Image: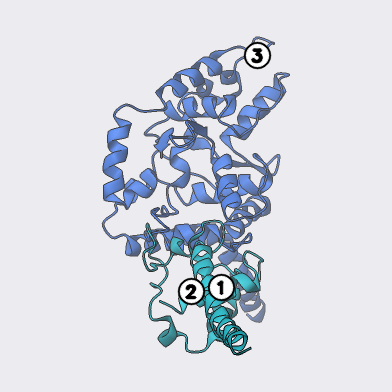
Chain colours: A cyan, B blue
Amino acid sequence: MKYIVEFLLIIVLVLPSLSHADNIAEGKSLTFDRKKGNCLACHMIDDGELAGNNGPPLLAMKARFPDREVLFQQIWDPTESNPYSFMPPFGKHGALTRTEINKIMDYLYTL
Amino acid sequence: MFRKILAVVLLLPALSVLASPEKDFDKFVSYFKDRFPNTPYQDYKNGVYSIDASAREQWEAMEEFPPYELNVDRGEELFNKPFKNGNTYGSCFENGGVGIRQNYPYFDTDRNKVITLEGALNDCRVKNGEKPLSYFKGKELAHVSAYMAYTSRGNVFNVQIPNTEGALNAYEDGKRLYFTKKGQLNFSCADCHVYQTGTKLRADIPSPAIGHPTHFPVYRSGMGRLVTLHERFAGCLNRIRAKSFKGGSDELNNLEFFTTFMSNGLEVNGPGSRK
């Protein structure tokens, strides 16, 4: 019985972090994928190759976007805060789903 | 007196509308002068190579053995090949169609529409009992256009916008399309080619807005064939995930009218070569 409890406890404790790690890996591939985020087109990111430079480098994201909702909104529809924004409204125009944006953010917050 | 003042006040906005293409042109040129102080105006005919020195070197090396040479020869053959009725393309154009690329596009006040070179070639075919040709896939239309551009190299674009409602509307329509955000990615032509020109999108530098039409059709090495200006417009729209317009449509004709007006004073240097 004791072992079973310990086993369950380990699963409960480890699983979320495992799935979080999965989200980060998946988020990174969504971020780099040319048919998805294609964020490298404009932003320098991590070890991404051939990065563009007309958007700011994606660094220190926790410090720059302490409020997760603000970052979400920026990816969902940047024209909300600046109608002339060069950045596509990924969520509003259906280029990325809410879940995909959240995975991308999980990755961005590791930078 | 009051009447006179009223007339002036009422006329002013109308006058400023009429004067706007020239004003737009001056604004455009001065914007690019500030943005790229080292690029002489005449050099914008070279597109992105006018602002990217390292890519220019490779391009100039490529131009030593122009990849479009065979296409120009083929274009000349097609240009001189008689239609079923015995006429040739040359019969429809001033000076037999030689050295006239710079006169297109123009606004035809009788037909109340913009006429591009490719459009005039298709009109010529229809007039002579032939079917109009596609603007896509680098076939006959692109070849004949490339040959006609080649015979016009060095001639200077001087697109006129007649002072008529139709012509100004066509210009405004082209300008609106140029500056309107479109497609799933929400880009306007101006987003990349005015505001972000000179920056990097992945490894590519978006070319400056001035000088785009001077070197069309272009031979694209990546595709291994000629591409007309309208196919290039459609390709851009496709890349921003927008619904495109047909080759020779009023939308693309008017867009060509606007962008060529913004390239007035530059030399014809088509066909160009691009990666």
Q: Which of B207 and B156 is in front in this view?
A: B207
Query: Around disc 3, counting alpha carbons within 10 Å, would you say few (fewer than 14), some (14 to 19), or many (20 or more)?
Result: some
Q: Nearer the viewer, residue A38 or B107?
A: A38
Visible in this render: residue A81? Answer: no
* Quadrant of the snapshot with the C terminus of chain B: top left
Q: Which of A82 and A93 is in front in this view?
A: A93
Query: Around disc 1, counting alpha carbons within 10 Å, would you say few (fewer than 14), some (14 to 19), or many (20 or more)?
Result: many
Q: Mark 2 lies on which chain?
A: A
Are circles 2 and 3 on residues that touch, CB within 8 Å? Answer: no
| Tag 3 residue | B83
Residue type pointed to by label 2? Tyr
Say left or right for B178 vs A59: right
Residue type pointed to by label 1? Lys
| Image position of B254 with respect to B201: above or below | above
| Image position of B193 with respect to B126: above or below | below
Are circles 2 and 1 on residues that touch, CB within 8 Å? Answer: yes
| Tag 1 residue | A103
User: How far across and down, in percent of the image, does residue B182 sit?
Assistant: 62, 60
| Tag 2 residue | A107
Report whether mark 3 lies on the same chain as mark 1. Answer: no
